[in-house]
Image (cartoon, rainbow, N blue to C red):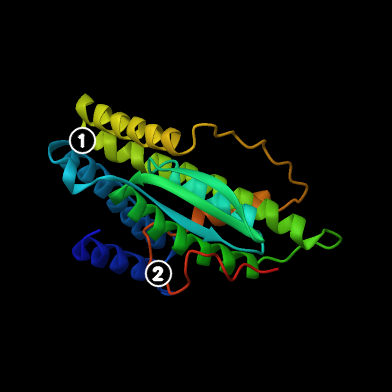
Amino acid sequence: MSEAMLSKVRKLLAKAEDPACTPAESAAFTAKATELIARYGVDRALLAARDPATDPVGDRVVDVVAPYARDKAGLLAAVADPLRCRCVRRAHGDGFALHLFGFASDLERVDLLFTSLLVQAAHGLSGTVVPAGEHPAAFRRSWLAGFARVVGERLRAAEAGAVAERGTPSVALVLADRSDRVARRVTEVYPRLRTAAPRRLAGTGFGAGAEAGRRADLGGRAVVDGAGGRGIAR
């Protein structure tokens, strides 16, 4: 992502995070940052359609570590899918190695957002009281599931809005072709890939996590913490 775009997004998020900002103003600033991220993805896709060398299909591996490694992996998948990337989860030590596939510009967006959202999730969990009598780990797992669900829905809506803004069928065709090319690359590397069974979570934190997901900044705030996912409360 260009430095000019990053600078604009960071300024919007700084305004959204200002304690003097009202909730409505904060939401407006965050929505604008998210919109810019989505527009950038569509613009890069259209540019690559004319000059494929500017945005090749690639892959990268993201290590997701304990605690709550499976839940962090779920958050990564929730971010990757709306941004037209695919991820394959592989067991690695006490966590997972997530093999991401996508176009270079989309992988960049996923990395930026996932790193930021991990920190936001850690902050949200640390400020959420586990209900009396409930197992903390079960509550936090369900909280993270709610957070990931809403973040994914918001990203999908932002991407759809960026596509609709262009208003031409060719944009949808370009993006569909990109998704197909990513899927083919995944099949080439993992010809016998299986879909994991859905999880069953017992905790009651889903609603609180979903609400935190609605408040989360989706503009890709730069953070120090790496994508390995340290910092989630135990």
| Vertical arrangement, residue 4 with respect to residue 90, above or below | below
Q: Is residue 210 visible?
A: no
Q: Camera-side residue: 107 or 150?
A: 107
Q: 10 Å neighbourhood of mark 1: few (<14), some, or many (≥20)?
A: some
How far from the left and from the top, in percent, is residue 43? 20, 44
> Residue visible at 25% across and 49% down?
40
Work out which quarter of the rendered image holds the N terminus and state it: bottom left
Q: Is disc 2 placed on a helix, strand or loop?
A: loop
> Where is residue 101, by image quadrant?
top left
Q: Is disc 1 placed on a helix, strand or loop?
A: helix
| Vertical arrangement, residue 94 with respect to residue 195, above or below | below
How far from the left and from the top, in percent, is residue 213? 53, 53
Farthest left residue in view: 50
Q: Going by the image, does 13 lie left or right of 213?
A: left
The residue under label 2 is 21
> Where is residue 67, by image quadrant?
bottom right
| Vertical arrangement, residue 39 with respect to residue 217, above or below | above
Q: Camera-side residue: 199 or 205?
A: 199
How far from the left and from the top, in percent, is residue 53? 17, 45
Q: Going by the image, does 47 lie left or right of 10?
A: left
The residue under label 1 is 166
Which label sits on residue 209? none
How far from the left and from the top, in percent, is residue 166? 20, 35
